[in-house]
């Protein structure tokens, strides 16, 4: 008698589990959100893209960390520098690392044509491309590393983005001024500063205005030079006269995105300190970095990807504000530049790279 009851109970649990799985699949297919803790109801295809051939945004692997924790088979190898397809048991990631916004637009159009379930756009150039490509066929888009999504037209408001896009914005008031202030504190002899700008970058005017305001307060002379291509950046550094500047500052998001390794290398060759906007700049030789932890942002973005794949609408998910900032100093670079780190800066430091 006991054996019969156990067998019936076992069958009942199996049947309930099977019905639950079918129910999740039906809910997702009807656009009704399934519980966040539930396993992915089916296989998904994602299009991920980024502009900047010489690096991978740390948020890409952060995103995969987050997706893996949520039950998606994204593999364990780091995201490669070259475009590729990463395919797991329940998800397919079409990763594109691209040279410019024009190729990003072509990639976004290909994602739409391939009918991916969701697009992840890293940084503003790719978000603009995604917006243009999905204007008629509204594929869901999760964006990362956008300074002002509302001003850019990516969201109607932060609380209610509307449309097919939502994601994570970095709303840091006066972060450029703070970065320049730290550079001056670390390099007291700083008087003239090379500022790299890209006239083709829509965000550049606002960023340059902030840089000029900060320079005026710090009494710094700015040597502003335009560049949009790799050759332009190389020519700017080649044109510098000995002692003309004592530091380098990038005032265009596009240049930060496309040529970070080049800028760091050219600055190091001329023994010029340069600050970065994320920890990987400091890890790769910049004097310091001050900004968001991109890998953590990627991990947070995975929750939005998961919700949308399970039926949530981007229009109903508020744009999240990244508020965590970290200061990372490269002590080896500081010694090479004969820079002494003041105690006032050390107190603010998140990490020191030896």
Image (cartoon, grey):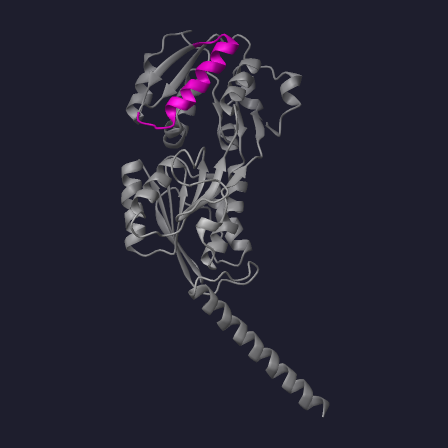
Q: Could you say which is closer to the camera, residue 350 or residue 251?
A: 251
Q: Determine if the magenta segment contains residue 231.
A: no
Side (left or right) of 18 relative to 92: right
As drawn, 73 above or below 319: below
As drawn, 50 above or below 315: above
Kindly report the secondary structure that dominates the magenta region of the rendered protein. Answer: helix
Q: Determine if the magenta segment contains residue 218.
A: yes
As drawn, 22 above or below 60: below
Residue 39, horizontal then vertical, whole percent:
53, 63
Position of the C terminus by quadrant: top right
Instruction: Farthest residue to the right: give it.
Output: 2
Residue 88, horizontal then vertical, whole percent:
43, 59
Q: Is residue 251 visible?
A: no
Q: Give the image quarter of residue 263.
A: top left
Residue 50, horizontal then vertical, whole percent:
38, 40
Instruction: Farthest residue to the bottom: give it.
Output: 1
Residue 212, horizontal then vertical, whole percent:
44, 14
Position of the N terminus by quadrant: bottom right
Chain part drawn in magenta: 200-221
Side (left or right) of 16 relative to 259: right
Q: Could you say which is closer to the camera, residue 23 or residue 233?
A: 23
As drawn, 189 above or below 167: above
């Amino acid at each position: 008698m006991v054996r019969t009851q156990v067998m019936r109970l076992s069958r009942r649990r199996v049947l309930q589990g099977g019905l639950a799985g079918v129910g999740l699949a039906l809910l997702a297919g009807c656009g009704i959100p399934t519980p966040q803790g539930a396993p992915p109801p089916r296989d998904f295809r994602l299009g991920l893209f980024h502009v900047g051939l010489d690096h991978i945004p740390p948020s890409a692997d952060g995103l995969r960390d987050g997706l893996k924790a949520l039950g998606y088979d994204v593999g364990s190898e780091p995201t490669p520098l070259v475009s590729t397809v990463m395919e797991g048991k329940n998800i397919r990631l079409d990763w594109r690392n691209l040279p410019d916004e024009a190729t990003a637009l072509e990639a976004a159009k290909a994602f739409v044509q391939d009918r991916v379930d969701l697009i992840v756009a890293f940084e503003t150039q790719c978000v603009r491309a995604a917006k243009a490509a999905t204007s008629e066929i509204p594929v869901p888009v999760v964006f990362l590393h956008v300074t002002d999504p509302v001003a850019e037209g990516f969201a109607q408001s932060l609380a209610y983005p509307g449309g097919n896009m939502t994601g994570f914005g970095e709303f840091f008031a006066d972060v450029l001024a703070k970065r320049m202030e730290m550079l001056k504190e670390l390099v007291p002899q700083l008087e003239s500063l090379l500022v790299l700008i890209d006239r083709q970058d829509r965000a550049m005017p606002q960023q340059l205005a902030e840089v000029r305001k900060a320079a005026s307060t710090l009494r710094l002379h700015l040597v502003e030079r335009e560049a949009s291509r790799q050759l332009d950046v190389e020519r700017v550094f080649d044109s510098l006269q000995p002692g003309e500047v004592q530091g380098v500052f990038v005032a265009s998001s596009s240049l930060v995105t496309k040529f970070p390794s080049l800028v760091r290398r050219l600055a190091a060759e001329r023994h010029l300190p340069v600050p970065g906007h994320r920890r990987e700049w400091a890890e790769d030789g910049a004097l310091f970095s001050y900004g968001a932890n991109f890998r953590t942002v990627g991990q947070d973005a995975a929750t939005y990807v998961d919700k949308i794949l399970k039926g949530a609408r981007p229009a109903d998910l508020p744009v999240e504000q990244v508020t965590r900032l970290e200061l990372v100093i490269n002590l080896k670079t500081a010694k090479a530049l004969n820079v002494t780190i003041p105690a006032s800066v050390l107190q603010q430091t998140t990490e020191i790279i030896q």
